Image (tube, grey):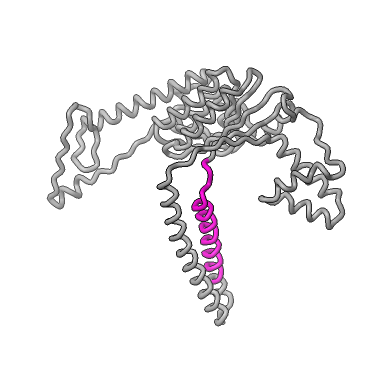
Amino acid sequence: MGEWIINIVTFLIQAIIVIGLGTLAALLFRRGKSDGDDELTLHTEVLNEQRDKRHRHLDQAGRAPRKRRSRLLRALRPGRRKKAAAKADDLPGSAAPEGKTGEGAGPRVWVLDFHGDLQASATEHFAEEVSAVIRVAGKEDDVVVRLESGGGLVHAYGLAAAELERLTAAGLTTTVCIDKVAASGGYLMACSAGHIKAAPFAVIGSIGVVAQVPNVHRLLKRHDVDVELLTAGKHKRTLTMLGENTEEGRAKFIEDLENTHRLFKDYVAGHRPAVDIEALATGEIWYGSEALKRELVDSVQTSEAYLVERMADARVISVWLEAPRRLSDRLGIALARGAESAVVRGLGALSATRWHRH
């Protein structure tokens, strides 16, 4: 019983400390925001070199004596990789493997990532990354976009698709790799590429449009609350949340949905003419292997497997934009991890009491 009380008190002390530090972090964050936004930084990483370094470390760990093996394996942990990479070249037998990984050694594959939400908020950074790649890419270069999105707002994903299509318009070979999901607006975006790869169980499709509008008119009417909706233009407002909806307004709303769906189907059909668009534009989803049979994708393969293949004959370079982290940002991340750890330990202590009571 005494141990249980100690655990609870420890958890409460940790929680108080976390709350106090959280308040301090919030103040620092507000101060940082008042100083204005920092400029984004463009980062690049040659994935060939990253992979070669890991392979060399693993190879050395497999052949080294036991004590040295532990040290080499520890070097692979996050935060130690750069230091380990610098020492890797000094190890016996750690010469770089043959292959085109040096400067000017043939074609390059530029890798971009797009992780979409409902508002496709990553589009702004993605557009700048696309511009940067277009400016430096050569005729032999390819672009791979690792795409993950369940879709969202029509206009937001329409813009994201247009940004991806700029790569094709610039004469670059583009491949979209879908490891988890590219549905609805995510699939609209994927269609802009020349080739679509999907993992066997990636979710593909959902070529449809959905909208829902809650209406509390009857609740307001029951409490004698009137709502006046004034518009200039017959169809300025079709359905409303507060007022009484009409059949005419409902019909117009559905007409607008159908029109959006038609535009969606036209876009997919225009970029993937082999697809039986009328049969597949039902809002259904398919897994990668099923989508291949319906020609929604061109091949079934994970992004990692494809990039490893490309490393045999090209420099594979990951490109991303990132805002520099302020002290408040780093402190906030540390606090979040600390709070999570404290909560987990507290819940663990509470759960453990079930097994120690007599």
Residue located 83% across and 54% down the image:
68
Residue 154 in magenta stretch: no
| Numbered range of the magenta stretch | 323-349
Furthest residue to the front?
A: 35
**Quarter the N terminus occupies:** bottom right
Magenta segment main secondary structure: helix
Residue 176 location, x and y as percent? Answer: 57, 29
Which of 284/73 is in front? 73
**Visible in this render: residue 249?**
yes
Number of disc labels: 0
**Quarter the C terminus occupies:** bottom right
Which of 224/105 is in front? 105
- In the picture, measured across the screen, residue 155 lies left or right of residue 295, that is left
**Visible in this render: residue 287?**
no
Residue 341 in magenta stretch: yes
Which of 334/142 is in front? 334
Residue 345 location, x and y as percent? Answer: 56, 67
Residue located 75% across and 47% down the image:
84
Residue located 83% across and 44% down the image:
90
